[in-house]
Amino acid sequence: MDLDPIAIIKGGLKLVERAGDEAYFAALCVRSGVVGLDPPCRVGKMLLEFERYGLLAGAIAVGAVRNGDRAAVIDERGVLTYKELHERSNA
C-alpha cells in the first residue's frame, strides 16, 4: 500500500475546511437561538424532531417544543403560534 503525501495533505485540508464550516454553522445556530441551554428532556425532544423531520421542518418543530404558545407568524389574518405552525405544516 503506497501512501501518497499529496493525497494525505489534500485530505487534511478538506478536513480543516469542513471543521471551519461546521464551527460556523454551530455559531450561527447559537446566535439565532436554535441551540441554547435547555433541560435534557427538552433537548431529547428537539433531537427527535430533527431526526424525524430533517433540518428545515425540524426547525419549526423545535420552535414548537421551545416556544409553543409564542407568536411565530403575525399577518393580516392574525397570529399563528409555533405549535399551530408545526401542526399545520405536518397536517
Image: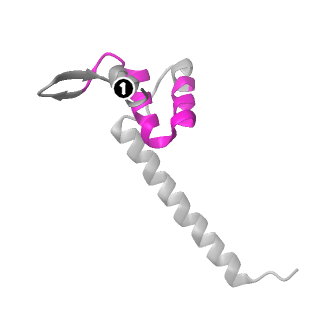
Q: Position of residue 11 (x, y in %)?
A: 65, 72
What secondary structure is found at the residue carrying circle 1?
helix
Q: Residue furthest front?
A: 91
Q: Quadrant of residue 90?
A: top left
Left or right, 43 with respect to 32, comes to right
| Residue closer to the observer: 38 or 47 | 47
Q: Residue furthest right?
A: 1
Q: Main secondary structure of the magenta part?
A: helix
> Magenta segment, which residues?
44-72
Left or right, 53 with respect to 64, comes to right
Left or right, 20 with respect to 69, comes to right
Q: Position of residue 34 (x, y in %)?
A: 40, 35
Q: Position of residue 6 (x, y in %)?
A: 68, 84
Q: Quadrant of the N terminus?
A: bottom right
Looking at the image, which residue is at 46% across and 46% down? 26
Q: Position of residue 57 (x, y in %)?
A: 43, 37
Looking at the image, which residue is at 60% across and 65% down? 15
Q: Mark 1: which amino acid? A: Arg
Determine whether 34 is above or below 68 in the image. below
| Residue tagged 1 | 88
| Residue closer to the observer: 42 or 74 | 74
Magenta run includes residue 68: yes
Determine whether 88 is above or below 12 in the image. above
Determine whether 55 is above or below 62 in the image. below
Determine whether 85 is above or below 2 in the image. above
